[in-house]
Image (tube, helix red, strand yellow):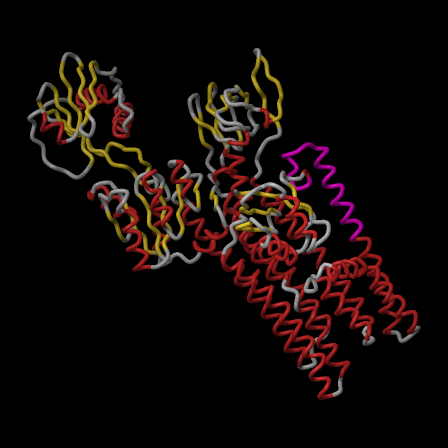
Amino acid sequence: MRHVYYIENLDCPNCAAKIEQKIAKLHGVTEVSLSYTAMQLHLTAETAEGLLERIQAAADSVEDGVIFHIEKPASAKPSHTHSHVEHAHGHHHEEKASRRDLLILAVGAVLFAAGLCLHFAAAGAFASKALLLSAYLVMGGSVLWASLKSILKGQIFDENFLMSVATIGALCIGCWEEAAGVMLFFRIGELFEHIAVERSRRSVMEAIDLRPETAQRIIDGGTETIPAEEVQIGDLLLVRAGDRIPVDGIVELGESALDTAAMTGESVPVDVKAGDKVMSGCINLSGVLEIRAAAALGDSMVTRILESVEHAAAGKPKIDRFITRFARVYTPIVVGIAVLTAIVPSLITGEWEHWIYTALNFLMISCPCALVLSVPLAFFSGIGVGSRRGILFKDGIALEVLAKIRAVVMDKTGTLTNGRFSVTEVTAIGCDLEVLLADCAACEAVSAHPIAIGILEYAGSMGIEASPAEDVQEIAGKGILGIRNGRRIACGNRKLMEDLGISVEESDSTIVHIAADGVYMGCISLADSPKPHAAETVAAMNRRGLHTVMLTGDNAVNAEMVSKSLGIAEVHAGLLPTEKPEWMQKVRAEKGSVLFVGDGINDAPVLSGADVGAAMGSGADAAMEAADIVYLHADPASILHSIDIAGRVSMAARICIGFALGIKILIMLLGFMGIANMWLSIFADTGVTMLCVLFVIVYVHLSDRKRTN
């Protein structure tokens, strides 16, 4: 059974990893994923009985104050999803805590500066030490207390313990100013880290949480304002210009243009009229609409997007899990090196103070926060960036694998083409072209087939309006028969014509032949036109060295025509649904990791089997369920956008890992050489963590905004 819990008061990524490890050992728990960035715990357990209590106990054994909730706490919700009272209440606590931290830092900084001035002025050594010690205790009191609690819980390798040992050791060897200074910059760095991560988390969640607070329900000839959560299926809602559509629904009355950018990433407004489906979260730009609710708020697209992004953070990529495992080993190893550095060289050289000082530097460096924070933050940011562009990544694993793909395999209809047939040529034999189109349109008027829709649209564009034929008979796989103006009209493929004793040339393209009373009148050629951005997307993928492939059940002629117009490198046509996975495996064997993009029910097997499966949002629910990524706007350009996002996330994670480890190793080597001091060591810990967090925010978030603009 799958469970989701929301977390409060967790402010250390290293502690998050330890809590996750503790919960994983609970009886009956088979799978655990704790996301520090999303503040959520996802786990699979045999039973829910007593589970929350056991989870809370496991967390308490690592860190006091961390609270788990079954429902999202008010303080964790974006401002527009809860009442103003709750919003003010949550922010009141945050602002109070921030003011307290800033006051402590200010007092500590003043005491530190005064003590430092006396120290360098060589005036009043006792007063200088008293001021520095006061500064240390003011700023480090909470760190020392947290360290003591960690020791009592058996958690000796957290950052509070390491910082406490290092600074107390510095005091013991007479480095008063360094102990106080290091604690000051540790607390400043810790505060900036928290602010940066919290703002990044809020910016992601608030950008995608587009649920309105209220809705206008039409009742008894008037309207009433109700909470959006109370809207029920079938309610008639009034949406004025400037309002956000509260729930998914169908337009009953009115015409308008909708801003769908927040939901799909599409900047061009979409025109809607009576009978059109509309999606929650979109903004009504002009006219007044009356909408019939087709789903409750909890089942509407805007909520599904929010939940998708929240849950996606639980799917940790391999690099994230590796860093978590690495951190468990890295910290004890560096602490061990610190102990050996303090003892072994001192026994040989007798310079105990120098080597103990060097060992204390190692203790500061040993905290792995830069690694365990920046990597998951990079993936969480990528998931948020994608959601703002109408791209739903179901987990971080999809992002990680997507960055390594070597081939892009795509379905044709609905993915690269519109799935809507348009007339390319009309050939009339022995009759007027208008008569041919009118006869065919009269028969096709009763059909919902895409070919019939294409013919009717073309006839309408030519100013031809024909009333439906009489006695219409649709013959599956062949065509349609009907009576118009006393004549028996037949519209269909070559097989239908052969049944009527009419011989026509064989063709693999889509052609509708028309006959009246057994006499051939002519034919209409149709084609499924490529989607906008399809050609430029394929061209961009080819330039990047990605091998492009199209797999389709359509005939070879149509497939070749589409592939040539788009520039696709490899095409396989006439495939059954069971044959697509076989061809995809062949591509994978030859080229490497594969991204498959489809939209139909028949694409579900190949979506599940691909390294990364992506579904167009306009497609079947089964396809979207089986996919790792959903492109809400069903635009081929989204394929390229998703690859770009994955590439930036992967690059950000690798840069952070290389930078953090590189700086730590460099400072350790400088320490051995007697060059590094505690100021550099605190930079290797808190400074590097802060720089990694800021780099992720700038590289993933801001670079995407520049590309969008």
Q: What residue do we see at 70% from left, 54% from top?
A: 63
From the viewer's perspective, tell me whether residue 105 is left or right of residue 243: right
In which quarter of the view is residue 131 placed?
bottom right
Q: Residue 125: say if magenta.
A: no
Q: What residue do we see at 28% from left, 42% from top?
A: 577
From the viewer's perspective, tell me whether residue 293 is left or right of residue 26: left
Residue 272 lies, in percent from the top left, at 44, 26
From the viewer's perspective, tell me whether residue 696 is left or right of residue 513: right
Residue 146 lies, in percent from the top left, at 76, 58
The single residue placed furthest to the bottom in the displayed view is 349
In which quarter of the view is residue 422 placed?
top left
Above or below, 478 relative to 597: above
Which residue is more in the foreground, 494 or 350? 350
The residue range painted magenta reads: 75-101
Q: What residue do we see at 76% from left, 49% from top?
A: 98
Above or below, 406 relative to 504: below
Residue 148 lies, in percent from the top left, at 77, 61
Which residue is more in the foreground, 305 or 426? 305
Which residue is more in the foreground, 144 or 44? 44
Give the main secondary structure of the magenta stretch.
helix
Q: Residue 90: say if magenta.
A: yes
Residue 636 lies, in percent from the top left, at 38, 44
